[in-house]
Amino acid sequence: MIMCGSIKDTPFWRYIKQPDEIGGCETQTANVIVNDADAVYRQAKAAGAEILLDIKTEDYGGRGFTCRDLEGHIWNFGTYDPWATR
């Protein structure tokens, strides 16, 4: 499960900065392993995500892309599962 929430005026969220407050940068990103990166890519584009790195098959065999959501956060989606090779 991945749980996401928008910024709020609470004690916890005072420790968080949105990307637009720090020049569009991130200090961390989520890497989400999916079964069908092409389907997620289409959904992300349809929902208005900004595609930062277009979908492609990597040299190591995974297929994925990188996007920025509507609040400016960067996400990586791909099919490569490092645990599957153990």
Image (spheres, rainbow, N blue to C red):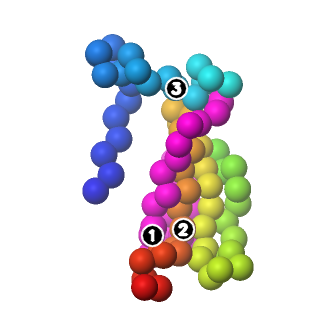
Q: Which residue is mark 1?
A: 34
Q: 10 Å neighbourhood of mark 1: few (<14), some, or many (≥20)?
A: some
In this rendering, is residue 11 above or below 70?
Answer: above
Specify which label sits upstream in the sequence, 3 or 2: 3
- Give the image quarter of residue 23: top right
Residue 22, magenta (yes or no) = no
The residue sitting at 65% across, 80% down in the picture is 60
Magenta stretch: give its range.
24-49
Q: Are marks 2 and 1 in contact (CB under 8 Å)?
A: yes
**Residue 5 % position (x, y):** 34, 35
Mark 3 to mark 2: distance in Å? 24 Å
In this rendering, is residue 86 above or below 18?
Answer: below
Specify which label sits upstream in the sequence, 2 or 1: 1
Q: 10 Å neighbourhood of mark 2: few (<14), some, or many (≥20)?
A: many
Q: Which residue is mark 2?
A: 78
- Give the image quarter of residue 10: top left
Residue at the limit of the structure toward the front, as seen here: 86
Residue 26, magenta (yes or no) = yes
The residue sitting at 70% across, 56% down in the picture is 53
The residue sitting at 59% across, 77% down in the picture is 62
**Residue 9 % position (x, y):** 33, 14
Mark 2 to mark 1: distance in Å? 6 Å
